[in-house]
Structures are given as C-alpha cells and as structure tokens.
Image (cartoon, coloured by chain):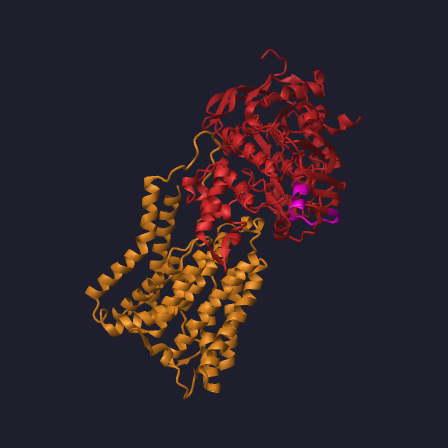
Chain colours: A red, B orange
C-alpha cells in the first residue's frame, strides 16, 4: 500500500470453497479510485467467483473487504449496493415491455413511489447521455433496442444508482466491433468521473485498450496487479495458462476412418462467413471460440435446430437436408446441448428411461416396450459410460452434475449415430468426473463415430481433440491438428485474433 | 412441482443424493398411500356414522357415479401427464356427447350410430384443441374457450330444452349388470386398466410421460410435442364421450345446464390421485381411486343433508388439503 493513489477497494485473504473444490484461495484484490482494472483468467480460474462475492451473491468463507478505508461485510445484494458496488450483468435484467425511462428507475431505493412520466423522461435523458445514448428516446420500449443499446442501458441503470465501484461482467460478449466501442467509451467515461471500474473480459484487445491495470486469475489464485503499460499479449497469455494437461485426457485417435460429416459452404443465421467442415470417423474435432464467435450457431445448424440457408451437408456420404431435430436424429446426428438441465435430461425419469429415450422404439414390438430388451440395452450403455448399473431406477434429477452429463451423452450411443455433437461437455462437472467424460467421448470416437466437441475451455479442447478449429466473430479462423497447436497459440488465437492476423 | 430442481452444488468428490435417505423414502411411501388410506378411512367412518350409506343401493349409485366421473378423469390423466395441465372444457364436452347420443338415438333408433356420433364429435373437438395447444397456446385458456363455445352451441342448439331419446331404449347401457356389476363400472375398470397398461408399457405412453417431464429435452431427443398432445387430447375425448353417453343413458334425458360440477370433480380426481400438475407423473389407477374418493365424499355430504353449496365447499377443501399435502410429501421425497 505504498501507492500515492488511495485505494478505493481492498480485498485480502479471500477464500471460497464449494464442497472440496477451492474456487478462490487467499485472493488479494485491489482497486484505485478512477482506474479501470481488468480481470482476466481462463474458465474456472475464479473470476466469476470474485465478482459474485463483490456483488453479494455469494459469501466468502474467509477474508476482509475494505472500501475507502472502511471495512464492509458483503452479506447480500443489498449490502453490496449500500457499499457502493454495482454490477453490470451479462444477462440483461431489463423488463422488455417497459420503456427505457421506466427501466432506468425500476427497483431503485431512491425512487419515490410515484413519478410523473415527464419528469421520469427528463431525468433519464441526463443518465442516458452519460453512456452515449443521448439520441435514444426514453419512451422507447426496451424490446425494440439493439443488443448493444440494451447493454448500454444496463450500464445506465447502474449509473442511476450512483455507485463508486462498477463491475462489468463480460459486457461485450454478444456485441459487434462497432458496438464494443460504445461500451468501452462508456466505461472510460465513468472512470474519468472518478469511479473505479472492474472489467471482466475474455478479450485481450479490450484490456489493452481501456484498462490501467490487470489482475490475472489462475487456478483460484490472483496475481498482483500489473500495469498494462508494462505488458504485451504474450506476457498476459503466459500468466493465464498453466493448467497441466496431465492424465485428464485419454490418448488421441490412432487412425481416422472415412468422412462421416462434411459441410460445404454452410450458411446459417449468426454466421458471418460460410463454413466448411470435415470430420472423420474416429476423430474428435474440437471447436472453440468465445461467446458470440459462431460455435454455438454452427453446432445448432448441424443439429438442425437452426435453419441452414445455404451450402450442403453430407452425413456418411449421403446428402441430407434437415428440417427439424427428428430429421437430424434420423440422419445420424446426435446432439447434446450445453445446458443439460434445460434440454438434456428428464429429471423426474429414471436413468433407465433417460438412457432409452431416443431409441426406445427399437426395443418395442407392436408398440409395446419389451422391458427385458430395454433393461439389457440400458445396462450395456450404463457399463460403457461408467454409470452405476445397480441404480438404473434412480431419478436422474437427483444425480450429480457429472453423472447427469454421462446420461445426457450416453443415451445417444444407443442410436448408433454417425456424428455426435456435444457442447460444453464438462460444464458444471467436477474434476474427477471430467476424466470419465473425456474417456467416454474418446471411446465413442474409437467405436466409429465422428465426435464434434464445442467448448470455451481451450485446455479441454486441446487435450481432448484430434483436430482443433477456432472461430472468431462468426467466422472460422483456423483448423489444425491438435498436435500443431500449443495452448499459448490457441488462447491467443481465440482471445486476440487481430494480433495474430497482422 | 417437478421443475424446481434443488440448487446444484458445484463441489466435486461427494456425489449428491447418491442414495435415497430414509426420510425421503418414507415421505414417498406416505405420499403413495395417503389417498388410498384416506378413501378407506372415509368409507369406514361414513359406514358407521351415516344412515343409508352402507346399503347396496347406495353403493351401486356411488359406483355408477364414480364410473362417469372416473372415465372422464382417467382420460384427463393423459393431458396432465404430458404437461398440458387440464382441460377446462371437459364438462361441456361430456354434456355435448350425452345430448348428441340421445338425439341421434332418438332420430335413428340405433344406439350404435348414437355412440359413434358422440365419440366422433368429441374426438373432432379434442383434436382441434390439441392442434392449437400443440402449436404452443396455453392449454387452460384454449380449453376454457372451447368449453364456453361448446356450451354455447349446445344451449343454442337445444334451445335450452331437455333432450331425450324418445321411445328408443337406452337405459340398459347404464343398468345392465355384468358379473354383478353395472355396465358403466365394468367399462370404467376396463378403461382404467387399459390406460394404465398402455401408458406404462408402450412407446407412446413412455413418450407422453417424458414429454411432461421435460418438454425441451423431449424435443431435442426427437419426441414430437404435437403428436403427444394429440394423443393426450384424443384420450380425453374418448373418456368424455363415454362419460357423456353413460350419463345420458342413466338419466334418459339431458340438457345444456346438466353436470355443472363435473369439470371440478374430474380435475379434483386427477389432483387427488397425485398427478404432478406440471406433468411427468400421473397414474390412471390412482386417478380412478381419486374419483372414487371425490364421489364418496359428495355422497356422504348429500346423505348428511348438506346443501349443494356446502357440498361444493367440502370437495374444494378436500382437494386443497390433499394437494398441498401430496406436494409437500413429494418435495420431501425428492430431497
């Protein structure tokens, strides 16, 4: 604490564990008045946990937080707001059917219970101007705004609260370049007003553009704050990576078979360029990119959940046109989404019924399920996927995240698809179960499937895949065998594409 | 409710909810047997305290009445199972089927034609609702509107008059005894068994259940929400038509304002039978028992000399208490 500038916020010895998993270990974090502090780190490094602690959503197990010299206890969202901390969330918390002005003052403690609409509009204009939305009519309904305008409105809402510390949680993930500029400008303007900004991002370019200092998280520990002026991209990347590939990943494919999936000039809503893709039997193709890079859109188009506008798709040598998910399944394309709770599992049904759900008609005669056949087939699947065969009657909703994921992926094995698409295979899955998941995906590839894994975890993509394809801003940017990538290159490619191009 | 999953613990190592706890198990056991036990209890108490309850004629009346409510309720079970909540148009569909049955029987003299006419009309109306609900409209609103339309058409069509089958004999449908039981009761038991077996053992039944458990997963797994909804509404249509025919045969006459509390009784039977309101869990057998309980309660209150208002109050109170109890027990059971 020898700096001339007084510290706005200082957090020391912050520790948070979930069960046996240490999300944060003895983390130190500081913030000066009027600075933009970037927060960097890989998925699971602890960024989001510290943001949750600052916003009062999660209580730290140990550690102290001091704001402007006063110790504060952050026990809930209200106490965090009272301490002058405001968080601009990734998910928009605006009410779509209300006007911009109404949203600005919604849920504010200082707001009186009745506002004249005219006064509301006048007050909003001043706040909107501060985030660069001076041309927006405050009487517009929020549902008519663009994504960038919604993000700026989200920031304006925080401003109306008059916070000293503003946390931006990946504010530009869903925005285009031109829109990003507006958000960055707003952040910079706030800092110049003397507020302290915590800027969480995955994009290195933004860090160098607006941040004064950066704190890098790795494996739940934080680095000392570094001056951005003293750093370059390689220096940042080197400080971020560092997880060992270790024994987590199974050996790569010994030999690839014929082409199972071939896309030529594929165009779907959300792409900014046509995509060509070839996946062979026995191959695990890893697709990686940030949110908004086009990986989700590609997988959804291949899974026939998103209309294909142009281009051709061949599965096992046959050209297919897929109208809906059922047609996709029939064509031999299985799909597991990133959100298994939403559309991957039947929580109230047993493991057995979950596993057999896509192919139960194949063990039926005259419409009646032959329970013996179903039992045998599901037991085989369960053994293959390391699911406890003595508990096949258990409700899937009561299983751990890792076991739920095994069920959500394993059920497709029974349809013997040509292609298996998996998004974020280990999200919410603990470390021990991850290795199982990787072994499972590899085993499926070895059995003759083409496996396409989309993941935002570069370590995982590199460790698991035979081939890695990267996406940036709706475009495919590079496809190379995994052995030709280093994690450093891959992180750099995904997070900072422009630097690589120039 | 089935959709409120417990918050996920991100902690590794200890797999959550690995084995069912003793408390969870016992809570589920109580939930499973609460309703049948209550039915037996009500039967015993009523037999001991209510004059005229434990008489053969009264039991016969209870059984026929249960059959009519129960057949419609067993049909409704499929709708609840698929996550489509309830049909609020079931009462008017039953009345329409009954009136159509009487009118066609009176006009043609053929009971078979009359039965087919009632079934056909009910199915067409059910499928129309299924297509709308399957396309994504709220089932409660859709069926409420259809119920109003059907009631309106019947009221206008009959001019508010009582409809009979004239001289054509139809009463035998309700009074014939098979193996000592009235025909409606036999139909009820057979239908319950049939729906029970079909929903537990067939691919279609399995898909209905999965659809109700998680519609989004069903769609990504290649299960058609539209097909499931159509099957469920068809099941209710058949149930409502048969209930209407038997009711009309028993009464020998019908008018638009008949059976005003039937919709409530049918939904009460499904709920008391322990169906999960959001879908994914429902059993025809338990719904049938639920119908029995509801009818016995009504019967006891009638014999005790309570007014229609008081009887309605009683049925409502029992539904609320049982549904809350079952919900709490089920929540304890999934922990």
Q: Position of residue B69 (x, y in %)?
A: 38, 68
- Residue toward you, A495 or B74: B74
Q: Position of residue A288 (x, y in %)?
A: 66, 33
Residue B83 shown left or right of residue A45 in the figure: left
Residue B289 showing in the rendered view: yes
Q: Which residues are magenta?
A: A296-312
Residue A221 shown left or right of residue A134 in the figure: left
Q: Position of residue B246 (x, y in %)?
A: 40, 75
- Residue appearing at x 55%, y 67% in the figure: B127
Magenta span includes A220: no
Q: Count the marks: how many?
A: 0
Position of the C terminus of chain A by quadrant = top right
Instruction: Check the image and report above or below for B77 versus B215.
Output: below
- Residue appearing at x 45%, y 63% in the figure: B76
Instruction: Check the image and report above or below for B203 versus A377.
Output: below
The extreme bottom residue here reads: B167
- Residue toward you, A232 or A402: A402
Q: Position of residue A300 (x, y in %)?
A: 65, 44
The extreme left residue here reads: B48
């Amino acid at each position: 604490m020898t700096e001339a500038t007084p510290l706005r916020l200082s957090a020391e010895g912050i520790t948070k564990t979930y069960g046996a998993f240490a999300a944060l270990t003895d983390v130190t974090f500081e913030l000066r008045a009027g600075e933009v502090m970037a927060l960097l780190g890989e998925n699971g490094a602890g960024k989001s946990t510290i943001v949750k602690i600052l916003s009062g959503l999660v209580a730290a197990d140990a550690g102290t937080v001091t704001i402007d010299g006063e110790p504060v206890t952050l026990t809930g969202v209200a106490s965090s707001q009272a301490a002058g901390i405001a968080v601009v969330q990734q998910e928009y918390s605006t009410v779509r059917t209300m006007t911009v002005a109404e949203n600005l003052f919604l849920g504010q403690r200082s707001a009186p219970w009745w506002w004249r609409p005219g006064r509301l509009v006048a007050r909003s204009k001043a706040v909107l101007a501060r985030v660069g939305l001076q041309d927006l009519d405050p009487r517009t309904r929020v549902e008519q705004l663009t994504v960038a305008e919604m993000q700026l409105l989200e920031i304006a809402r925080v401003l109306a609260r008059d916070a000293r510390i503003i946390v931006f949680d990946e504010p530009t993930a869903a925005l285009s370049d031109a829109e990003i500029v507006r958000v960055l400008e707003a952040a910079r303007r706030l800092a110049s007003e003397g507020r302290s900004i915590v800027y969480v991002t995955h994009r290195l370019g933004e860090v160098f553009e607006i941040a004064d200092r950066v704190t890098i998280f790795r494996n739940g520990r934080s680095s000392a704050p570094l001056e951005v002026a003293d750093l370059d991209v390689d220096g940042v990347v080197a400080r971020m990576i560092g997880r060992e590939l270790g024994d987590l990943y199974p050996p790569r494919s010994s030999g690839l078979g014929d082409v199972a999936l071939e896309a030529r000039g594929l165009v779907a809503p959300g792409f900014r360029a046509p995509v060509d893709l070839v996946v062979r039997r026995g191959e695990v193709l890893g697709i990686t990119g940030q949110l908004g890079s086009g990986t989700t859109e590609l997988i959804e188009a291949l899974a026939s959940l998103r209309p294909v506008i142009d281009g051709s798709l061949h599965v096992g040598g046959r050209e297919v046109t897929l109208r809906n998910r059922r047609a996709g399944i029939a064509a031999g394309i299985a799909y597991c989404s990133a959100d298994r709770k939403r559309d991957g599992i039947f929580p109230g049904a047993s493991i057995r019924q979950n596993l057999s759900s896509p192919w139960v008609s194949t063990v039926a005669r005259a419409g009646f399920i032959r329970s013996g056949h179903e039992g045998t087939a599901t037991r085989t699947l369960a053994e293959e996927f390391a699911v406890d065969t003595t508990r096949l009657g258990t409700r899937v909703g009561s299983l751990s995240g890792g076991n739920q994921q095994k069920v959500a992926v394993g059920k497709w094995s029974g349809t013997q698809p040509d292609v298996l698409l998996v998004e974020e295979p280990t999200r919410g899955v603990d470390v021990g179960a991850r290795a199982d998941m990787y072994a499972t995906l590899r085993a499926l590839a070895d059995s003759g499937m083409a496996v396409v894994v989309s993941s935002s975890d570069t370590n995982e993509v590199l460790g698991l895949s035979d081939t890695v394809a990267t996406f940036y801003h709706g475009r495919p940017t590079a496809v190379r065998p995994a052995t030709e990538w280093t994690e450093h290159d891959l992180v750099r490619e995904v997070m900072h594409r422009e630097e690589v191009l120039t | 409710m089935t959709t409120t999953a417990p918050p996920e613990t991100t902690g590794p190592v200890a797999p959550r909810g690995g084995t069912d706890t003793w408390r969870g198990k016992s809570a589920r056991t109580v939930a499973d047997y609460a309703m049948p036990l209550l039915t037996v209890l009500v039967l015993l108490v009523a037999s001991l305290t209510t004059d005229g309850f434990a008489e053969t004629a009264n039991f016969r009346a209870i059984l026929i009445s249960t059959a009519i409510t129960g057949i419609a309720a067993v049909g409704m079970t499929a709708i609840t199972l698929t996550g489509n909540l309830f049909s609020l148009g079931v009462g008017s569909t039953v009345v329409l089927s009954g009136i159509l049955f009487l009118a066609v029987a009176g006009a043609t003299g053929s009971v078979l034609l009359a039965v087919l006419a009632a079934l056909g009309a009910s199915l067409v109306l059910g499928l129309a609702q299924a297509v709308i609900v399957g396309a994504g409209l709220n089932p409660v609103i859709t069926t409420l509107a259809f119920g109003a339309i059907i009631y309106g058409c019947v009221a206008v069509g009959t001019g508010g008059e009582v409809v009979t089958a004239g001289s054509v004999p139809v009463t035998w449908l309700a009074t014939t005894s098979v193996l000592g039981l009235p025909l409606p009761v036999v139909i009820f038991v057979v239908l319950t068994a049939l729906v029970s077996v079909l929903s537990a053992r067939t691919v279609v039944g399995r898909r209905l259940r999965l659809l109700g458990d998680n519609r989004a997963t069903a769609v990504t797994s290649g299960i058609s929400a539209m097909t499931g909804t159509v099957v469920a509404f068809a099941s209710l249509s058949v149930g409502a038509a048969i209930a209407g025919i038997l009711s009309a045969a028993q009464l020998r006459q019908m008018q638009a304002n008949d059976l005003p509390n039937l919709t409530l009784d049918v939904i009460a039977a499904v709920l008391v039978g322990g169906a999960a309101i959001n879908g994914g869990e429902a059993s025809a057998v338990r719904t049938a028992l639920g119908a029995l309980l509801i009818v016995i309660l009504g019967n006891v209150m009638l014999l005790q000399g309570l007014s229609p208002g008081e009887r309605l109050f009683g049925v409502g109170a029992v539904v609320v208490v049982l549904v809350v109890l079952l919900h709490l027990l089920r929540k304890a059971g999934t922990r």
